Image: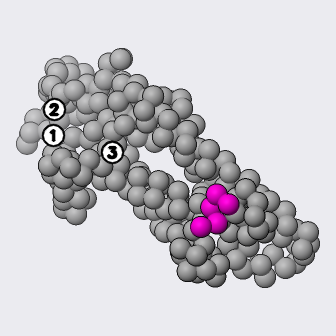
């Protein structure tokens, strides 16, 4: 862990030049392992491709002038390929939840613990009042809950329902046998398509909220939140101290 400092001039007293600066000390902490960072960017790419191609499949007229049936077939293949990659990525993340460091498990919704509920309510209060405390190095309770609900709730539902719909093109095939039971459970083929589309829009809302919260937290905490998904490192503020700065005299 490396120590870094950031200097900020202290407010000048009336009629006097500032004699000191605030020196904020940071500790560089390795938080996100390569496997977690790879999952993040792979999942982001898959969700983007799946939403765009899924929208074009649901509304084929937007693609009417780009090659007709052959082009739509290619879009479907891209959609299916991205879905398979996304499914593997989810399994990969579950594995690294177990195999990874403590940060890989941070924020997991422990509904049975009072401390988790207190942390969740405190985090919601911070965003509502815009009064932020010290940020955790890993995921906080609210982030962990939203990731589990979106990626392993809506995301897993998309994988299962998508494979069930794909299995309908080959009745009695492997996908139809493994996932076809979800179609009657969801009310038939039409309703399965409907729920699949609604879940896709739910993921879209999650992505928008996720990007907004990340930008807000990065500005508020200035702890390397965005860069951490490239380098794996975050910066934890240790303390503030006043140091003499003779150059300001």
Which is more toward the observer, 229 or 182? 182
Image quadrant in which you'd find residue 101: top left
Could you tell me how far apart the alpha carbons at marks 1 and 3 are, in whole angstroms? 41 Å
Crowding at dot 1, Cα within 10 Å, few <14 / some 14-19 / many 20+, comes out as few
Nearest to N terminus: mark 1 or mark 3:
1
The N terminus: image quadrant: top left
Q: What residue sits right under mark 1 in the picture?
A: 11
Percent from the top left, x then y, of residue 123? Answer: 23, 53
Image quadrant in which you'd find residue 139: top left
Could you tell me how far apart the alpha carbons at marks 1 and 2 are, in whole angstroms? 7 Å
Q: Main secondary structure of the magenta part?
A: helix
Which is more toward the observer, 180 or 157? 180
Report the span colored magenta.
Answer: 177-181
- Taking the image as shown, residue 237 lies to the left or right of residue 30, namely left
Crowding at dot 3, Cα within 10 Å, few <14 / some 14-19 / many 20+, comes out as some
Could you tell me how far apart the alpha carbons at marks 3 and 2 are, in whole angstroms? 46 Å
Q: Is residue 233 visible?
A: no
Q: Which mark is residue 108?
A: 3
Q: Which mark is residue 18?
A: 2
Which is more toward the observer, 156 or 211? 156
Nearest to N terminus: mark 3 or mark 2:
2
- Secondary element at image label 2: loop
Q: Residue furthest left?
A: 14
Residue 91 to residue 202: above or below: above
Q: Residue at x 41, y 52 (%)?
A: 148
Which is more toward the observer, 166 or 85? 166
Q: Is residue 59 visible?
A: yes
Circle nearer the viewer, 1 or 3:
3
Circle nearer the viewer, 3 or 2:
3
Residue 135 to residue 53: above or below: above
Q: Residue at x 68, y 51 (%)?
A: 84
- Secondary element at image label 3: loop
């Amino acid at each position: 862990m490396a120590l870094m400092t950031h200097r900020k001039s202290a407010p000048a007293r009336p009629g006097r030049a500032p004699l000191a600066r605030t020196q904020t000390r940071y500790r560089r902490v390795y938080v996100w392992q390569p496997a977690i960072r790879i999952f993040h960017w792979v999942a982001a790419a898959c969700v983007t491709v799946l939403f765009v191609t899924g929208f074009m499949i649901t509304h084929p007229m937007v693609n009417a002038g780009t090659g007709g049936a052959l082009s739509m077939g290619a879009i479907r293949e891209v959609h299916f390929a991205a879905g398979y990659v996304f499914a593997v990525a989810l399994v990969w993340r579950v594995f690294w939840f177990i195999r990874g460091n403590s940060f890989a498990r941070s924020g997991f919704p422990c509904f049975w613990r009072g401390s988790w509920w207190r942390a969740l309510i405190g985090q919601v209060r911070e965003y509502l009042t815009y009064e932020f405390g010290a940020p955790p190095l890993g995921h906080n309770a609210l982030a962990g809950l939203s990731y589990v609900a979106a990626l392993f709730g809506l995301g897993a539902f998309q994988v299962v329902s998508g494979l069930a719909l794909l299995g309908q093109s080959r009745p009695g095939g492997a996908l139809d046998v493994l996932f076809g039971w979800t179609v009657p459970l969801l009310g038939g083929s039409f309703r399965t398509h409907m729920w699949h589309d609604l879940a896709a829009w739910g993921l879209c809302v999650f992505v928008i909220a996720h990007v907004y919260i990340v930008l807000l937290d990065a500005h508020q905490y200035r702890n390397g939140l965005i860069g951490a998904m490239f380098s794996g490192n975050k910066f934890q503020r240790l303390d503030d101290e006043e140091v003499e700065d003779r150059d300001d005299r």
